[in-house]
Amino acid sequence: MAHPNTDRLIDYWRQRRGAREAPTRASIDPTHFTDLLPQIFIAGVASLGNYPLRLSGGFVTELHGRDLRAENLVTLWSHADRARLQSGIEIARRRAEPFVVEADIHAEGVPTVGLEVLFAPLLGPSGETDRILGLYQPLSMISRLQGRPAQTLAIRAMAPAAGPERPALRLAAIDGRLIA
């Protein structure tokens, strides 16, 4: 179950997609979600496993305690989770579907803080998914970090974004025989 802000951005992404497999970069208008801009990031796709951050909102930058421009998105995550995150991003790009990661923010000397991160692919002018629109949504009080920057993010769970249910398969047949 996603946070209402995450659901809102997923709904916006689906609305902007229209009949296309994913929305184009040009179809995303930040004025439609100005209250979320501090939590937004946009990553490019330079090559497999290299997703340079092109834009990061104030909350995202402050959470990590540094300018994130051109930093590879996967390096913000624990070493143990980088391959899994890369795989999730590549699957989302190929399927043109967003996914959500439930994560823990790790900072020195304080308890972890829950975070939900949305990854939603965007189509570039070439028709390739060459950007990722993302959202950092805290799930608990950020003040628990006591102003300390996030050292790493760690994956707790990862799943496709919930959406309109697809019709379930009702009948199937093999060699003319009905199977359940």
Image: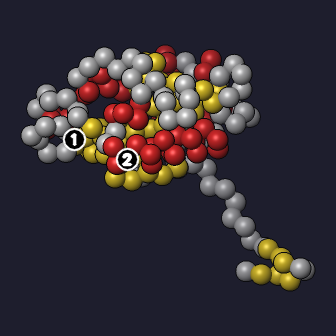
Q: Residues within 10 Å of mark 2 (few under 14, many from 20)?
A: some
Amino acid type at mark 2: Asp
Q: Quadrant of residue 75?
A: top left
Distance between the Cα atoms at labels 1 and 2? 13 Å
User: Tag 1: Cα neighbours inside 10 Å, few (<14), some, or many (≥20)?
Assistant: many
Question: Could you say which quadrant of the image residue 37 lies in?
Answer: top left
Q: Quadrant of the C terminus?
A: bottom right
Q: Which residue is mark 1?
A: 106
Closer-to-camera residue (12/59): 59
Q: Nearer the viewer, residue 86 or 106?
A: 86
Q: Earlier in the sequence, mark 1 or mark 2?
A: 2
The residue under the point 56% across, 29% down is 47
Q: Secondary structure at mark 1?
A: strand
Q: Which mark is residue 81?
A: 2
Q: Residue 149: give x, y in percent of width and height.
A: 19, 29
Would you place residue 131 above or below residue 97 in this image?
A: above
Cβ atoms at labels 1 and 2 below 8 Å apart: no
| Mark whose residue sits in front, 1 or 2 | 2
Image-based side of 62 in relation to 165, left or right: left
**What residue is drawn where x is 34% and y is 39%?**
77
Q: Please indicate whether residue 64 sits to the left or right of residue 89 in the image.
A: left
| Lateral position of residue 79 relative to residue 112, left or right | right
Residue 139 coordinates in the image, percent (x, y): 28, 43
* Residue 115 appears in view: no
**Residue at 46% from the left image edge and 18% from the top image edge:** 54
Q: Is residue 123 above or below residue 85?
A: above
Task: Please count the marks in the image.
Answer: 2
User: What SS does tag 2 mark?
Assistant: helix
The percent position of residue 23, horizontal first and vertical second, equals 64, 29
What amino acid is at disc 1? His
Coloring basis for residues: secondary structure
